[in-house]
Each structure stands twice: as structure tokens, then as C-alpha cells.
């Protein structure tokens, strides 16, 4: 065993009330996310609208509060009008972002219907690649205006008498990336984003808007992009976006597990940039962050290079996730919660088949990948207040990252349920880690509801169609309460959820 780690959980040291939308996700018209994922007419598990009920049930268990849609890179060439009205009149289009054919059999109204069943809100991304201010106001009018105008009456004629009431809108996607259809300089984007935001809010003043930050910390224009974009958009938007993906290309698991430290660093520097513009503008408003694409993404990179272009829904970005990926996702979730004072929305990218916690076979089963479990645990048990993790932990260094604590953890206090949940990853690949949690500020004795553990001897183990349950959480953790202290042994390379009754 390595040395012990300790954690003081004090109800007076609050980072923030966690905005539920931090547990959001993302569905793009990409690969088999929509066609063969959430929508597959004729599948034995599909309803009369073609919505796969087996997939919906896995999503409902995740309690996903909000889903970003319809892209992603896809959105920058997308005409939302192609996806409304009678299906037999909708065009098939060449989709240039992912080099496929988009049949447009699923669009805005289908997604709104589907999201209601999934129990989630919609975060709609508008096209600011090939579209502009006019389409920006039109789509808000179609979706949210009650009646008596061209676009709202068209929605009614499509069978939707009531407005959809979509509250959250992204102003384009990754507009700094040269791979983006209609990519822009920061000034070009800042201007079009500000003007679009203005008219969108003139149509519906109740909406909230997300401006595009950099598509990653590695972009040459980061963080100047953020500063310039905010210079133009600060008064018009509520959120700035961040995106990041991590991989284990060199099979250096110790470093891979430390990547969440980089995510935190990234968040802090974007916060600093937002606050610089706030000061520069003498503004009273604080810009919040929408980390609306984050995940592990690397397994499918080579396979994707071999996919023939211009197919409908080919198997793109189908990462099969390992046990160690689940640990990284656990660390990334904890990183988001540690910064929940500014990260108010976040989207695990993506939700089904495309770098996703849920996989399906066309005509076949649906199952949960390894990363499904930390995401589900955080979303289900991580509602309430994030408490400052006062942690002492032994640390390790790798060639790339130093001072990585073996213990990554955070506690969430749910006052209504009178529960504290500790989420903890032991990054030590060879040794168990004894953990002592001190809950003295809550006064009185506490008890363990359950100690859930996700672990496997083989860090490369996966869940597949033939072995869908190889990696599954168990409730065999040994956390025990003594007065106001909890002691537990965190198995090597494990994800832990310790639920404590106060
Ligand atoms: O999520 C996959 C892709 O990653 C998205 O389309 C894009 O926004 C990002 O580069």
C-alpha cells in the first residue's frame, strides 16, 4: 500500500452550487450517433417514430440534463430547414465536415420530440459557418415564437402548435479551426456572433447564448481568440465555450491519468481571460463557461482514415473505451466539479456511438461502455453543492506532468437528501490507497449508504456487444464510518463513489 491520503469535507467551504447542466452531453449528425444510434426506424426496439427505446432507457438512467445538437463540425454547413416538414420532401445533401451523405430524416422537431422522452433540454447550435444573421433570427422564430409570423406559423403547420421554448443556443462551433466550414478570424467571428446574438434575443429575450472559445488549448490563436471574441460579444452572451479531448497515444497511462490537471489549468486560464475582458469593459457581468465538448478520443483515429466518403451514417469515431479511459473520464468529471463556480454547463462528447458512453449495433443491441459508469454516478449522485477538496495525497511525476496526486477527489453535499457523496479516483496503478475522510463540520456520526467501485485487473478491458457487462461497478467497497470519520481502501486504479448519510 502507498501512504495514506486524507480529505477534510467541510460544509462551509463551498465552491458553488452545481448547475445540473454540468452533466450535459452532445449528439451530432456524425457517424451513427443519430442514424442507427438514437433513431432507427424498423429496429425491434424502436417506437412508431423510429426512436430506439433501448437507447432511450440507457440515456434516461444517466439523467442527462441538456444535450447539444446538431453539431459539432456538422453544423457549420447545415441548413436547419432541410430537416423540417414532410420527410419525403427533405433533401439528401453532401455533408462536407465528415464527408458523408446527410438524408435529413431526423431534424429539429424530431430532436425536440426525442429530447422530451429522454428527459433532457435542448442546447441548439446554429450555423455560423455558411449561415449568418438572417438564419439565426429565423430559427429562433421557428422554434420559439408562439404564432402569427412566417416561421412560427410554418412550425404550427408542421404539427407543433406550441413553441419549443429552446432556451440555450450555441453561436456556431469551433469557428477558429481551419477544418471548420466557413472558419473565421476572431474579429470576423466576434462580429457575426454579436450581431446574431442581438437579433436572436430580439426575437426571444429569454434565451441564453454561448460564444465559441478556442477549439482547444493547443490552437495557435488561443487565448487571444477568447479575448477578441469576448471584446465583441461580452454584452450579448452568457457563456464562452471550451473544448478538449485527451488520448493515450503513447500508452503512458500514468500521464494519461494526469491529464485532468491540464483540463483544470485550461479552465483557469479561460476564466482569467474572461475576467480580463470584464475588467477592461468595466462590466458587472461575470462570464460563465460552457465546457461543451470534453472526453477521451483517440482509439478510432486510424480506423476513421479508412472509411469511404459519401456514405450515410458510416461507423465514424467509434472509440471502444477501456477501463483506464473510465478512470480518466472520472478525473475529468472531478476537474469540472472543482471548477463549478465558473463551469456551469458541460457536455460529454458525445452520447451514442460517436466517442460515446453508449454503443449500439444497427438492428442489434445497445450497451454501456466503461465511461458510462463514472458519468452516470456523477450525474445521479453529484447534485448539490461542490465542496472544496482539502486533500493531502502522495504524488507522482511523469516526464510530461509533475505533482500528480494519486488521489483525485471531490465531495458533493446534497442538503435535501442529507447526503455527502465523495467521488474519488486512485491513480496509483500498482497500490491501493488508504483514504480517511473527515466530516467533522457536519456534527455527529455518519453512516455509509454504499461504496461503489469500478475497477478491473486489465486496464485495457472493454465492454463490447458480445461482452457488454465485462466492466461494471460493484458495491463492494470497504468504506466504513467511525463517528464523523470515514475510512476506505481505494483499490489500485479505481473509480469510487462513497455515499455518506449524515
Ligand atoms: O465531437 C467530435 C468533433 O470534435 C466535433 O464535431 C467538433 O466540434 C470537434 O472538433
Image (cartoon, rainbow, N blue to C red):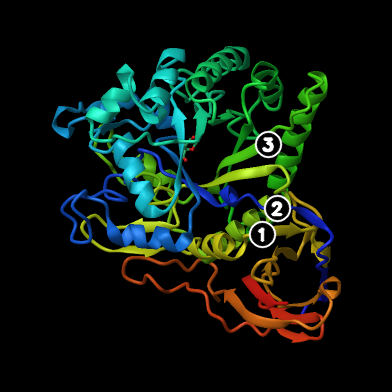
Picture quadrant where residue 307 is located: top left
Which SS class for mark 1? loop
Mark nearest the camera among 2 and 3 is 2
218 or 207, which lies in front? 207
Q: Is mark 1 within 8 Å of ligand 1?
A: no
Q: Is the N terminus in the top left, top right, bottom left or bottom right quadrant?
A: bottom right
The residues tagged by marks 2 and 3 sit, at their Cα atoms, a distance apart of: 14 Å
Mark nearest the camera among 1 and 3 is 1
> Is disc 1 surrounded by few (<14), some (14 to 19) or many (20+) residues within 10 Å?
many
**Between discs 1 and 2, the one toward the N terminus:** 2
The residues tagged by marks 1 and 2 sit, at their Cα atoms, a distance apart of: 6 Å
| Residue 440 placement, left or right of 173 | right
Picture quadrant where residue 421 is located: bottom right
**Between discs 1 and 3, the one toward the N terminus:** 3
**Between discs 2 and 3, the one toward the N terminus:** 2
Residue 263 in the image: x percent, y percent? 68, 46
447 or 479, which lies in front? 447
> Is disc 2 surrounded by few (<14), some (14 to 19) or many (20+) residues within 10 Å?
some
Disc 2: which residue: 17
Q: Is residue 195 above or below residue 395?
A: above
Q: In this view of the protein, can residue 84 be seen by the observer?
A: no
Residue 8 in the image: x percent, y percent? 84, 69
| Residue 157 placement, left or right of 479 | left
Residue 362 in the image: x percent, y percent? 24, 54
What's the residue at 71%, 27% (across, down)?
A: 223
Disc 1: which residue: 384
The residues tagged by marks 1 and 3 sit, at their Cα atoms, a distance apart of: 18 Å
Which SS class for mark 3? strand
Disc 3: which residue: 288
Q: Is the C terminus in the top left, top right, bottom left or bottom right quadrant?
A: bottom right
The reply to whether callout 1 and callout 2 are in contact (CB within 8 Å) is yes
| Residue 320 placement, left or right of 397 | left
Amino acid at each position: 500500500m502507498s501512504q495514506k491520503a486524507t480529505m477534510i469535507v467541510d460544509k462551509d467551504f463551498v465552491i458553488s452550487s452545481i448547475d445540473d447542466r454540468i452533466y450535459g452531453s452532445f449528439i451530432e449528425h456524425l457517424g451513427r450517433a443519430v442514424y442507427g444510434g438514437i433513431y432507427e426506424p424498423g429496429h425491434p426496439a424502436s417506437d412508431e417514430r423510429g426512436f430506439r427505446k433501448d437507447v432511450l432507457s440507457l440515456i434516461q438512467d444517466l439523467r442527462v440534463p441538456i444535450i447539444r445538437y446538431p453539431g459539432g463540425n456538422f453544423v457549420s454547413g447545415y441548413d436547419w430547414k432541410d430537416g423540417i416538414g414532410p420527410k419525403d420532401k427533405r433533401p439528401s445533401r453532401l455533408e462536407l465536415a465528415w464527408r458523408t451523405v446527410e438524408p435529413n430524416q431526423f431534424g429539429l422537431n424530431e430532436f425536440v420530440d426525442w429530447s422530451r422522452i429522454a428527459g433532457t433540454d435542448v442546447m441548439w447550435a446554429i450555423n455560423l459557418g455558411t449561415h449568418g444573421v438572417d438564419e439565426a433570427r429565423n430559427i429562433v422564430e421557428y422554434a420559439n415564437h408562439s404564432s402569427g409570423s412566417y416561421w412560427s406559423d410554418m412550425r404550427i403547420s408542421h404539427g407543433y402548435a406550441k413553441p419549443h421554448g429552446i432556451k440555450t443556443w450555441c453561436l456556431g462551433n469551433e469557428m477558429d479551426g481551419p477544418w471548420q466550414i466557413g472558419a473565421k478570424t476572431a474579429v470576423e467571428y466576434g462580429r457575426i456572433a454579436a450581431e446574431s446574438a442581438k437579433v436572436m434575443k430580439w426575437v426571444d429575450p429569454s434565451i441564453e447564448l454561448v460564444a465559441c472559445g478556442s477549439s482547444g488549448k493547443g490552437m495557435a490563436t488561443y487565448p487571444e481568440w477568447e479575448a477578441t471574441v469576448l471584446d465583441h460579444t461580452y454584452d450579448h452572451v452568457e457563456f464562452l465555450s471550451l473544448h478538449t479531448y485527451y488520448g493515450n497515444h503513447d500508452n503512458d497511462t500514468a500521464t494519461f491519468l494526469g491529464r485532468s490537471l491540464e483540463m483544470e489549468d485550461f479552465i483557469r486560464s479561460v476564466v482569467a481571460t474572461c475576467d480580463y475582458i470584464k475588467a477592461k469593459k468595466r462590466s458587472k457581468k461575470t462570464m460563465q463557461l460552457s465546457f461543451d465538448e470534453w472526453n477521451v478520443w483517440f482509439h478510432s483515429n486510424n480506423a476513421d482514415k479508412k472509411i469511404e466518403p459519401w456514405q450515410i451514417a458510416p461507423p465514424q469515431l467509434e472509440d471502444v473505451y477501456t477501463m483506464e479511459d473510465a478512470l480518466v473520464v472520472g478525473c475529468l468529471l472531478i476537474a469540472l466539479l472543482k471548477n463549478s463556480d465558473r463551469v456551469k454547463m458541460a457536455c460529454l462528447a458525445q452520447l451514442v456511438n460517436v466517442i460515446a458512453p453508449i454503443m449500439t449495433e444497427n438492428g442489434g443491441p445497445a450497451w454501456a461502455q466503461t465511461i458510462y459508469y463514472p458519468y452516470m454516478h456523477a450525474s445521479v449522485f453529484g447534485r448539490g453543492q461542490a465542496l472544496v477538496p482539502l486533500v493531502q495525497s502522495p504524488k507522482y511525476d511523469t516526464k510530461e506532468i509533475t505533482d500528480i496526486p494519486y488521489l483525485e477527489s471531490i465531495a458533493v453535499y446534497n442538503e435535501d437528501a442529507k447526503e455527502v457523496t465523495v467521488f474519488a479516483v486512485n491513480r496509483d496503478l500498482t497500490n491501493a490507497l488508504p483514504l480517511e475522510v473527515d466530516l467533522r463540520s457536519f456534527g455527529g456520526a455518519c453512516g455509509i449508504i454504499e461504496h461503489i467501485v469500478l475497477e478491473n485487473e486489465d486496464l485495457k478491458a472493454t465492454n463490447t456487444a458480445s461482452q457488454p457487462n465485462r466492466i461494471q461497478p460493484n458495491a463492494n467497497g470497504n468504506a466504513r464510518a467511525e463517528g464523523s470519520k470515514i475510512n476506505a481502501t481505494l483499490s489500485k486504479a479505481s473509480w469510487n463513489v462513497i455515499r455518506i448519510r449524515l
